[in-house]
Image: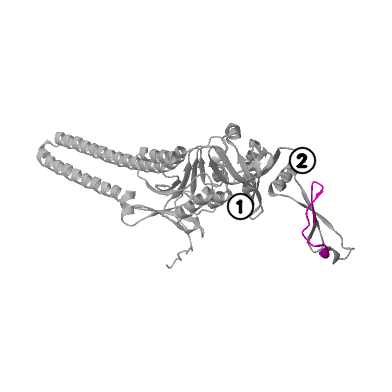
Amino acid sequence: MWRRQCLVAPDGAPIADQSHGQRALDFRSRSDFRSRPATVPVMSVIHYTVSELMSETSAAIKERLGGPVWVDGEISGPRESRGHFYFDLVDRDDDGSVVAKVPVALWSRNRIKVEEKLRSAGGLSLNEGVSIRLRGPLEIWIAGGRLQLTMTDIDPNFTLEALESQREKVLAALRKEGLLDRNKRLAVPEMPTTIALITADESAAQADFLHSLQNSGLSWDVRYIDAKVQGNGAEITIAAAIRTAEQLDVDLIAVVRGGGSKLDLAVFDHELVARTIATCSLPVFTGIGHEIDISVADIVAHSAHKTPTACAEAIIDRAAHVIQRAEEAWREISFLIVDTLTSERLRLSNFAHRAALGGKNRVQIHFSRLAAQSARLSRAATTAQRTETARLDLLATRVQAVDPIRTLARGWSITRNAKGQIIRSVDDVQENDTVITTVADGSITTTVATIERRTDNA
């Protein structure tokens, strides 16, 4: 290797240049040498060309590391070019700032093996922000003047363990703050027909959810909010969508997405998404397409379901249950009316029959008074029939008067607590309780602010 050694005086001026031990020319005059003190020390400095320096550095790295090494870090800025894959492997501090990074090159010949290994581990992929452990030599690209790792292998278990570790940290933080059950404690309206749906626009999850609602035969009001549900920045769009839904006049929020790999669904383990759901002022139903794992979003949600279809059906079941109860109430009222009319008709028939028998006996005993008695009996029967008919009409009117729908239409209402129990006294509620008031055309959910008891002289 070419090396050039130059002797330098303390002031930095070259004294002699030697190449491979041969003395180089010195263009200074002899008087310059004579003018310097004989005791001036001479320092030795090695000069390199750029190629020499980079080659020496490369050799030193190979000698020090001894070949390929395993390196842990987070993917930043992934990009693809001509079948090759490039990204930076970075370390971050507690604030998320990059404190160290090294460029990584995954050549196409190694990329096939690496990606197959990731797919076999559950569909992992090299996405922005993913923590990985890769193997490869640290090399210097001499022409580009850059240090880089050439990726040849990957440890998928490291990524899976990192995801699980982060998930447990999020759960621990939420548990410590008492947020795991907060959304579950919110009351869901008895007839939740106005829904904020959060998912990717025109996705299979959106289609499945809406198809289930349409097939129910009930009337729904769905407010759709588009959100990115996987990849870099998805947690921000999901959290923003939930906050937007909170401002809408809806009964509940449904967050759904179809199936995917563990890494695809990792956004639903993100602390921002979980914390937003837990602190939401409206009940949040999830329908995230997985069969085995439960995401942190599922744990903190009011109600979790395995698929978007299952989520929609759970909401349908709630509404159908209310309708069923109303139909049962109407059937009970109908049976009561029929039984009352049948009983009154039988009583009238018995009365008429007794009256006819009495008239016949009197005719036989008092034949002479037949004409007069017959006329009176006829009038009595007619009068009795009119009286009973009028009484039946009055009874029917009273039955109609107690019809709950008519009562509600006249301005009355029925108030229940969050458990559906009718409130009949101020003793049945406390301040800050949630109550649902049913009126003729719907229901109103309110929170009790104050309670005033009526005095005897009120």
Q: Position of residue 431 (x, y in %)?
A: 51, 60
Among the 4 quarters of the image, the one containing residue 30? bottom right
Q: Residues within 10 Å of mark 1 (few under 14, many from 20)?
A: few
Among the 4 quarters of the image, the one containing residue 36? bottom right
What mark, if any, has residue 237 been given in the picture? none
Q: Which residues are magenta?
A: 16-32
Residue 203 as seen in the image, left or right of residue 299: left
Let me know if residue 28 is in the magenta part: yes
Q: Position of residue 274 (x, y in %)?
A: 56, 49
Q: Residues within 10 Å of mark 2 (few under 14, many from 20)?
A: few
* Residue positioned 32% across, 39% down in the render: 335
Residue 206 as seen in the image, left or right of residue 86: left
Let me know if residue 264 is in the magenta part: no
The vertical placement of 189 against 152, above or below, is below
Q: Position of residue 238 (x, y in %)?
A: 50, 49
Q: Which residue is mark 2?
A: 63
**Quadrant of the rendering where the C terminus is positioned:** bottom left
> What SS does tag 1 mark?
loop
Q: Which residue is mark 1?
A: 178
Residue type indicated by callout 2: Glu
Q: Is residue 51 visible?
A: yes
The vertical placement of 411 against 304, above or below, is below
Q: Is residue 423 visible?
A: no
- Which of 328/84 is in front? 84
> What SS does tag 2 mark?
helix
Give the CA distance from mark 1 to mark 2. 54 Å
Question: Mark 1 or 2, which is nearer the eye?
Answer: 2
